């Protein structure tokens, strides 16, 4: 089988992760956490997720001209994601995410986008062949231009939720949302002509088309360590499965298993499964 070809127009961050017992409430200080740094950013995570599952992936984005840039790109580079269109921009810092993770694996994330918000439609080629994966951590007009210029499957992860033009929703062949995002977009999702994948955390995911539920999947049972990046693993895996023409129910199960495996390990990019790991889990379940 030929490997799916995917362009990701998306964010690159360096994640600073404080893992502790509980998450702080507003105004509260909690102590006793341990600190780790991992490559992250929804765009970069989804690019790596698809790459580890066998796709040929290129990433269009920006990092800063600082010492964090190489660290943020290290795992993408190591796994062979094409970074020729990922520019270093001396005028901005590399994007950073401050992430608190509790003993239950739940997180709180604050993103400082830095160079990500400097990606413009001029950074995109006039035509994108193959599939596109995009999220909403870049300027919306850049995401919209990417979708309009794509001659292939457009997978749009509406995260983090933000106002988007109707034309972008209309162009998306596949929209991926979690429950919070689904509530934000409401009726607009039901009007979408494409597939809508709704992720439900540990309960799995559903696939909808034209207001009708067409597939349901439950994930394999795992010990949750850190849910950061689980949604990104789902997006990358769903795109690969659909491009491989897997039937809808199998594609959804494939994506759910990728999300569950990512949640069973620490960090965003370090937790993303390989194809062999994913196939092994699917064979067992
Ligand atoms: O989806 C998880 C990602 O969101 C993290 O890696 C963080 O960088 C934020 O972009």
Image (spheres, rainbow, N blue to C red):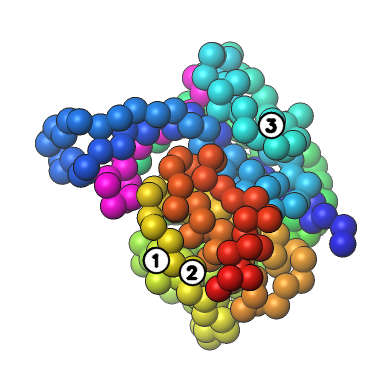
Residue 99 image position (x, y, % from top left) = 35, 37
Give the distance between the C-alpha atoms of the residues marked 3 and 2, in whole angstroms: 28 Å
Magenta highlight range = 93-108
Q: Is residue 244 visible?
A: yes
Mark 3, Cα crowd under 10 Å, few <14 / some 14-19 / many 20+, is: few
Asked whether, in this view, residue 96 is left or right of residue 149, the answer is left
**Pick the front one: 59 or 142:** 59
Question: Considering only vertical position in the picture, is 165 above or below 282?
Answer: above
Residue carrying label 2: 219
Residue 68 image position (x, y, % from top left) = 52, 19
Q: Is residue 106 magenta?
A: yes
Question: From the image, which quarter does the C terminus lie in?
Answer: bottom right
Mark 1, Cα crowd under 10 Å, few <14 / some 14-19 / many 20+, is: some
Determine the secondary structure under disc 3: helix
Asked whether, in this view, residue 59 is left or right of residue 14, the answer is right
Residue 191 image position (x, y, % from top left) = 53, 76
Residue carrying label 1: 202
| Residue shown at the point (33%, 50%) measured from the top left | 105
Asked whether, in this view, residue 90 is left or right of residue 154, the answer is left
Residue carrying label 3: 78
| Residue shown at the point (70%, 59%) measured from the top left | 240
Q: Are marks 1 and 2 in contact (CB under 8 Å)?
A: yes
Q: Is residue 173 magenta?
A: no
Asked whether, in this view, residue 30 is left or right of residue 101, the answer is left
Question: Considering only vertical position in the picture, is 202 above or below 81?
Answer: below
């Amino acid at each position: 089988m030929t490997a799916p070809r995917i362009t990701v127009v998306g964010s690159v961050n360096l994640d600073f992760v404080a893992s502790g017992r509980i998450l702080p409430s507003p105004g509260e200080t909690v102590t006793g956490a341990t600190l780790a740094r991992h490559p992250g950013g929804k765009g970069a995570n989804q690019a790596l997720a698809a790459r580890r599952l066998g796709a040929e992936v290129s990433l269009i984005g920006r990092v800063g001209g600082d010492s964090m840039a190489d660290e943020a790109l290290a795992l993408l580079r190591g796994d062979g994601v094409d970074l020729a269109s990922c520019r270093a921009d001396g005028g901005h810092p590399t994007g950073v995410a401050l992430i608190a993770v509790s003993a239950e694996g739940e997180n709180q994330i604050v993103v400082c986008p830095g160079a990500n918000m400097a990606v413009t439609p001029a950074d995109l080629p006039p035509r994108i062949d193959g599939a596109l994966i995009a999220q909403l951590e870049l300027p919306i007009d850049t995401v919209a231009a990417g979708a309009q210029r794509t001659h292939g499957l457009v997978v749009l992860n509406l995260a983090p939720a933000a106002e988007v033009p109707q034309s972008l929703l209309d162009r998306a062949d596949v929209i991926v949302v979690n429950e919070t995002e689904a509530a934000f977009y409401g009726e607009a999702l039901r009007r979408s002509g494409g597939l809508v994948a709704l992720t439900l955390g540990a309960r799995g995911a559903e696939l909808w088309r034209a207001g009708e539920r067409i597939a349901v999947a439950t994930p394999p049972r795992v010990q949750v360590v850190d849910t950061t990046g689980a949604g990104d693993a789902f997006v990358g895996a769903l795109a690969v499965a659909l491009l491989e023409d897997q039937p809808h129910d199998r594609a959804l199960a494939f994506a759910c298993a990728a999300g569950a495996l990512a949640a069973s390990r620490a960090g965003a990019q370090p937790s993303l499964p390989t194809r062999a790991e994913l196939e092994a889990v699917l064979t067992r379940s």
